Image: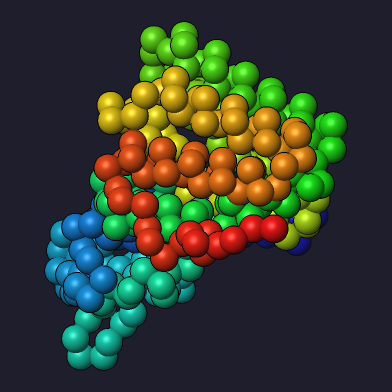
């Protein structure tokens, strides 16, 4: 019984320490917001440890612990005698759950991050759509249609932020359903990992005034019909058109480096 009581006390102490730790200001969170929003660019140095200690009124050990979070996911690097520098986007572990969460919350004002995500999607999603057109089952098509109908319903009836959020949720579900319809376990799992980054672009483009929502919905319908009709080539092109509309809504030029540009499909 004594041992049990000691274990309980130790567990309680750990929980109390975690509570106190979580209640202090988070340097990692603040720097992540500043970096993802574009305040600090790759190559920039973030404030030094002592400056962060003073700003957040926490000790140096806590600052170092928070900086370590950003180092571990490749966002910053520690340079002895100089401080901490933001690394190139290519070095960021954007598939890490913490990084994708930060990206979703803080990257909306940063067109460079948006462009990186858009470039990746243009490289990948047309091929995913082409594969889905070959392999989609009846159940996959039902999931795709339900997501599409949800988009339409919450587009036409959207009079509140919650309804607009639902429209974006269904939009993300639409794209996730295409990944799953490939029946490839890697693509299917990747749809979960990519969900936050897809949501970032979807939510931003759906509130844009530079693209007609009805036209966007029609592009999604055409993509769905190409998959339903088992037309891989047409699905590839339809996916490109959907993403070109996203680029237009975000005010971004469609990246010229996408793998699908200039590809001749059989």
Relative to residue 57, is residue 75 depicted above or below? below
Which one is in front, 222 or 38? 222
Is residue 191 visible to us here? no
Is residue 109 visible to us here? yes
Quadrant of the image occupied by residue 69: bottom left
Outermost residue, right side: 138
Relative to residue 9, is residue 206 depicted above or below? above
Q: x and y percent of residue 213 in the render?
A: 41, 23
Q: x and y percent of residue 100 in the render?
A: 48, 54
What residue is at 68 percent from the left and 30 percent from the top?
Answer: 225
The C terminus: image quadrant: bottom right
Q: Is residue 113 left or right of residue 215?
A: left
Q: x and y percent of residue 176 in the render?
A: 64, 42
What residue is at 19 percent from the left and 73 percent from the top?
Answer: 44
Relative to residue 229, is residue 193 depicted above or below? below
Which one is in front, 156 or 195? 156
Quadrant of the image occupied by residue 50: bottom left
- What's the image's color scheme? rainbow
Which one is in front, 49 or 208? 208
What residue is at 41 percent from the left and 38 percent from the top?
Answer: 245
What residue is at 37 percent from the left and 58 percent from the top?
Answer: 255
The N terminus: image quadrant: bottom right
Q: Is residue 50 left or right of residue 104?
A: left
Q: x and y percent of residue 202 in the render?
A: 45, 37
Count of numbered circles in the view: 0
Quadrant of the image occupied by residue 63: bottom left
């Amino acid at each position: 019984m004594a041992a049990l009581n000691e274990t309980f006390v130790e567990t309680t102490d750990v929980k109390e320490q975690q509570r106190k730790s979580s209640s202090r200001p988070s340097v990692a969170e603040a720097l992540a917001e500043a970096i993802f929003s574009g305040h600090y660019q790759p190559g920039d140095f973030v404030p030094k440890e002592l400056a962060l200690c003073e700003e957040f009124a926490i000790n140096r050990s806590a600052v170092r612990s928070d900086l370590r979070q950003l180092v571990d996911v490749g966002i910053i690097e520690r340079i002895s005698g100089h401080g901490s520098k933001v690394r190139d986007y290519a070095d960021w572990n954007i598939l890490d759950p913490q990084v994708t969460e930060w990206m979703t919350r803080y990257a909306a004002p940063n067109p460079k991050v948006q462009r990186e995500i858009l470039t990746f999607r243009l490289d990948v999603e047309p091929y995913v759509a082409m594969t889905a057109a070959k392999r989609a089952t009846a159940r996959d098509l039902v999931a795709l249609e339900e997501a599409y109908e949800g988009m339409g319903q919450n587009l036409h009836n959207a009079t509140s932020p919650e309804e607009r959020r639902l429209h974006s949720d269904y939009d993300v579900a639409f794209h996730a359903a295409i990944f799953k319809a490939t029946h490839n376990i890697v693509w299917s799992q990747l749809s979960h990992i990519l969900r936050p980054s897809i949501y970032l672009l979807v939510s931003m483009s759906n509130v844009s005034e530079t693209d007609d929502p009805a036209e966007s919905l029609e592009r999604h319908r055409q993509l769905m019909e190409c998959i339903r009709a088992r037309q891989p080539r047409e699905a590839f092109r339809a996916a490109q058109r959907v993403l070109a509309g996203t680029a237009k809504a975000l005010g971004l030029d469609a990246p010229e480096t996408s793998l699908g540009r200039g590809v001749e499909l059989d």
